[in-house]
Amino acid sequence: MTGNQEDAVSDTVDDRRLRELSDASEDLHSDAMRGSRVAVADLVEAAAPGRRMSRGGAALAVGLAGAGVLATATRGSAATMDVAILQTAASIENLAVSTYTTALTLPFIGGAEANAVVKAFAMKTMAQHVDHATAFNAAAVGLGGQAQTALDPKYAKVVDAAIPTIKGPGDVVSLAITLEDVAAQTYTKNVSQVGSSMLRKLFGSVAAVEAQHRAILLAVAALLGGGAADLIALPPDAAKLPKAAGGVGFPDAFYSTSMASPSTEGAV
Amino acid sequence: MTRYDQTQPDGKPRGEMGVGDAELRALTKDLDALHRDTFPTALEQLRDTTSATRATIRGLARGPASRRGVLLRGLAAAGAGLLAACGGSDGGGKRTAMGGTPTRVASPYTGDLRVVALAAALENLAVAAYTMALTKAAAGDYGAVPGAVGEFATVARSQHAEHAKAWNGVLSGAKLPTITGTPLTIAASEVAKVKATKSVPELAAYALGLENAAAHTYLYAMANVSDSGGIATAATIAPVEAMHAAVLAFIAGDYPVPDAFIDTSSAVGPAALTA
């Protein structure tokens, strides 16, 4: 890194603070993943095919946890639909991972020209999408389905078309906003479509995180678009942030589902 | 100076549940106006959801007691362990020996509708908290307040008011009284926390806890409510609360999305509802 680059970075981020935040985030992330593994394990235990039909105790356990209990006659078809929904979700996550991976190869996202906070955010967000894909696939396999390793076919085309047109960080952020929004909308809708409380909790949990990604990206996009890239820092100079930065990240009081992907869009 | 929560307007000492009531009423007096004024489009979008909710709720209300009992037991069992940061032991709600719901025999809010009422009360609490914070800011209590912080509080407050209206729409549809105040065991302590904030960072830290508690509570609701309309409503609101939290964390200088999964660790359980 050149002296000028170092100066540029030091202008936008407190390196020590960022490392502390990253370390803390890793700890939190690990804790969250442990919780998720437990949740997925519980799901597998409670909802695995074969066990589900023969072990009333599993369904009862789900009920005691507050879940809606599926009618026996509809369990098979409900589980099939759940698997498709989970595979589609995994395909969306796979695409997000692929897109952030590609973005991080660009000099203005993951290279020498990158804003340190944007780079750290892209890396962390990519890792979180890996976690989401892992959780969705574990649940799908637990229900007797296959893990989905492919990309969402509809939005893969969108990404493929966008990549050659990217000229700067704003273009990447714009593309990422689209993917995060589609993911959040899809999972928000999925909450009402899946057949168990454990899956509702899984989709609700991930939808909120994708929405958080989008909120930060919207704020970053606004700062980039307003020529205030220097304010993308941790901590930011709050006094210099434009007033609009306080509300641009959450434009709607209710999260829309109008762009939600169909349940079978990314099914195996 | 007499603390706001020590006496009632008539000078008599406040009871546990009377603590802060007058102040909360004052803080939330603009709720109706906010509810009337804000975002009819969003409410229109919710109308289908809430109409479905009403139909299901009517069925629940007429349904066999055993079904409600099962649901309540499930909620109580799940909720007993969920009274965390915002729903701690302070607040004075009397509880049964089993640690379930407060000792109230005439609550009209049962089953799923108890969670709906809880949600409305929490949203009202958020509106009250942001109103108080904006009032303190205008009075100079926080010194120079960045414009982005004021904008955050203003927009977040209006969205919480919309959320409250949505939840109250469900209650109205079930022919139940709407929740216009903050009938929560935690209300007084939460107001005290807001009053105690002396700087923007302190306010941000408080608000971050509030938003996380809201998001966690709705995640809890998604997993524990059986009505499809209630699930869908919680699902569309939780991401917005989480977005509030992320932006707030960013402004405060914290990493904005620290966890790959949100959980229910800060959820406020139904036992916190005193109505």
Image (cartoon, coloured by chain):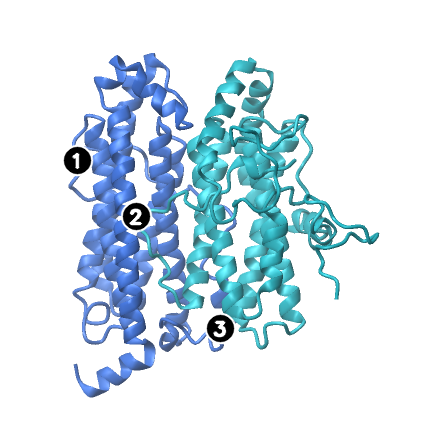
* Chain name for mark 2: A
Label 2: which residue?
Answer: A32
Foreground: disc 2 or disc 1: 2
Q: Residue at x 45, y 39 (%)?
A: B82
Label 1: which residue?
Answer: A147
Relative image position of residue B253 (x, y in whole percent): 40, 68
Whether discs 2 and 1 lie on one chain: the answer is: yes
Q: Decide: marks 2, 3 in contact (CB < 8 A)?
A: no
What is chain A's hue in the picture?
blue
What residue type is disc 2 on? Ala
Q: Nearer the viewer, residue B9 or B240?
A: B9
Structural distance between the alpha carbons of marks 2 and 1: 22 Å
Under circle 2, the secondary element is helix
- Locate residue A85 relative to residue B181 in the image: left or right: left
For label 3, the crowd category at 10 Å Cα-Cα, with few meaning under 14, some 14 to 19 and many 20 or more, is: some
Position of the N terminus of chain B by quadrant: bottom right
User: Where is B115 relative to B180, above or below?
Assistant: above
Examine the rendering and report whether any part of residue A255 can be seen: no
User: Where is B101 relative to A109, above or below?
Assistant: above
* Chain name for mark 1: A
Q: Nearer the viewer, residue A169 or B202?
A: B202
Structural distance between the alpha carbons of marks 2 and 3: 33 Å
Under circle 1, the secondary element is loop
Under circle 3, the secondary element is loop
Relative image position of residue B72 (x, y in whole percent): 51, 25
Foreground: disc 2 or disc 3: 2
Q: Decide: marks 2, 1 in contact (CB < 8 A)?
A: no
Position of the C terminus of chain B by quadrant: top right
What residue type is disc 3 on? Pro
Label 3: which residue?
Answer: A242
First in sequence: mark 2 or mark 3?
Answer: 2
Whether discs 3 and 1 lie on one chain: the answer is: yes
